[in-house]
Amino acid sequence: MAKRSNEPFLWLLFSAGGALAALLLPVLLFLYGLAFPLGWLEPPSYQSMLTLISHPLMRLLLFALCFLGLCHWAHRFRYTLYDGLQIKHLNEVIFVLCYGGAMVGTVLAGYLLWTIP
Amino acid sequence: MADKITLEVMRYRPEQETEPTFQGYEVPFHADWVVLDALNYIKDRLDGSLSYRWSCRMGVCGSCGMMVDGEPQLTCATFLSHYLPGPVRVEPLRYFPIMRDLVIEMTDFMDKLQRVKPWLIRGAEKPLLQGEYLQTPEELDLYKQFSMCINCMLCYAACPVYGLDPQFIGPAAIALAQRYNMDSRDQGSEQRLDLLSQHDGIWGCTFVGECSKVCPKEVDPASAIQQYKLTATKEWFRAFLMPWSAK
Amino acid sequence: MNDISAHTAYHPRWYRPRVSTYWWLWRWVYLKFILREISSIAVAYFVVLLLLQLRALSHGPEAYAAFQAWLKVPQIIALNSVCLLFVLLHTITWFNLAPRAIVVRVRGKRVPDRLIAGSNYVAWLVVSVAVAWLILRG
């Protein structure tokens, strides 16, 4: 019998990312992407932003959001490419591009969150 | 109301053609007729050469599944009146090889049902003198929904993952596996896990959800699959963190 | 019998229609499914946006002001609006599908789907208000 797939781990990352994104992304994208640029609400100042993300828990949350959000994209996009474009035969390439991309983004996020004053 | 309706039926006679064609038949329209009634009328009165499967004509045998206007339906449960004024397009079940006319090849499906070990697996059988395996209504409720499957294959016709990858084990097979996994009398979930936790097991499923939509018995195979993903994930972590604990 | 198990055996007379690459365009339900899956790109885009914002913050007030000005460019606003729509699609489909995966039984009875979905929506509201308050209080 074939060895059991390690897919469950990737699926868990996908699910966690999906849940976190579902809860947090709408309000964040609305505020920073629409409300502040269009002047509907007063954006926080540079100093306020730094204070906001200075707390280690906040940095941890943002890191989790980046890491899990990217894992969510990687997993879902990988299957979309398999099914949507029927290019399953390229699955190694797709796997590396998707999860590799997610890891690059995670490392960048970690670096930025570590070095911000 | 109309007194006639046209059916555009797919014909495929491998001994005389290499591609399927469509043939139109005009049948009487009755308000209480289903598509199967129309097909039987065609077979009895218009064209005896039409081949198709049917049996109970009341939605319990699962034989008469076909594509009606592009949707997987039990033809015995689909009223002609729904498609007025017509024409109604009738084709064989999608994603299966077509043997002849509306008859598809279903060995792949039958084989997959067998593969999930759809029987009660016990570590050790109870001695006969100890009596039957008892089960409470609450324990029955855990798996009852998944036991309602009539093997009609509409879910396979609706599942794009199966269409794209015929190796995918498919909704009905997984729902059947869950029917046994969740049965309090069964002790075989470990054995089924080996088969199901594969890429062509549950992990090929992307929760399109169409399988549950077309199911005539409300089995909700999509839910069975997602629940099993959670179970398989818990098992994976248990095996990863505590590899010494064998079930 | 087991030989047929991997995939249906070859038979010269059986007809196998090939599934089109555009199978997802031929049914509205399949298109809705693909759109739902595409929403994951919006999630990745947001993370990129967040990384850009963090980088701007780390480079000082002028860099951050430049980043904020960039966000005001009409094409970027349009892009962000489209992404917001996809993010909302993701959220709504995620919460509506949650009850199918998370089946909770209380005292032997299954908790109704709308309660599970509903509690997700309530959590969404609470989290959104909390986040907005944190950001807006200045």
Image: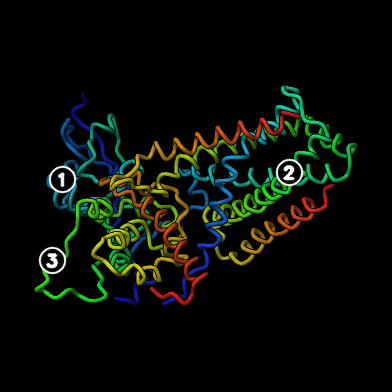
Report whether residue B14 is seen: no
Image quarter of residue B193: bottom left
Residue found at the far left of this picture: B129
Find disc 3 in the rendering and name its residue: B132
Provide the chain ID for the residue under circle 3: B
User: Chain ID for label 1?
Assistant: B
Residue B8 point in image, percent of width and height: 29, 42
Q: Position of residue B154 (x, y in %)?
A: 31, 51
Q: Which of the 4 image quarters holds residue B189?
A: bottom left
Q: CA distance from mark 2 to mark 1?
A: 57 Å
Q: Position of residue C25 (x, y in %)?
A: 50, 43
Q: Which mark is residue C97?
A: none
**Residue A13 as seen in the image, left or right of residue B135:** right
C-alpha distance separating marks 3 and 1: 33 Å
Residues tagged by mark 3 and mark 2 found on one chain of the structure: no
Q: Is residue B128 above or below residue A82?
A: below
State which chain disc 2 sits on: C
Q: Residue B78 placed where, x, y %?
A: 24, 39
Binning the other alpha carbons within 10 Å of mark 2 as few (below 14), some (14 to 19) or many (20 upward) gives: some
Q: CA distance from mark 3 to mark 2?
A: 62 Å
**Picture disc at residue C50:** 2
Q: Which residue is mark 1?
A: B58
Left-right relation of A114 to C95: right
Residue at disc 2, secondary structure: helix
Amino acid type, residue under disc 1 in the picture = Met
Task: Judge from the rendering whether residue B129 lies leftward or rightward of residue C60; answer left or right.
Answer: left
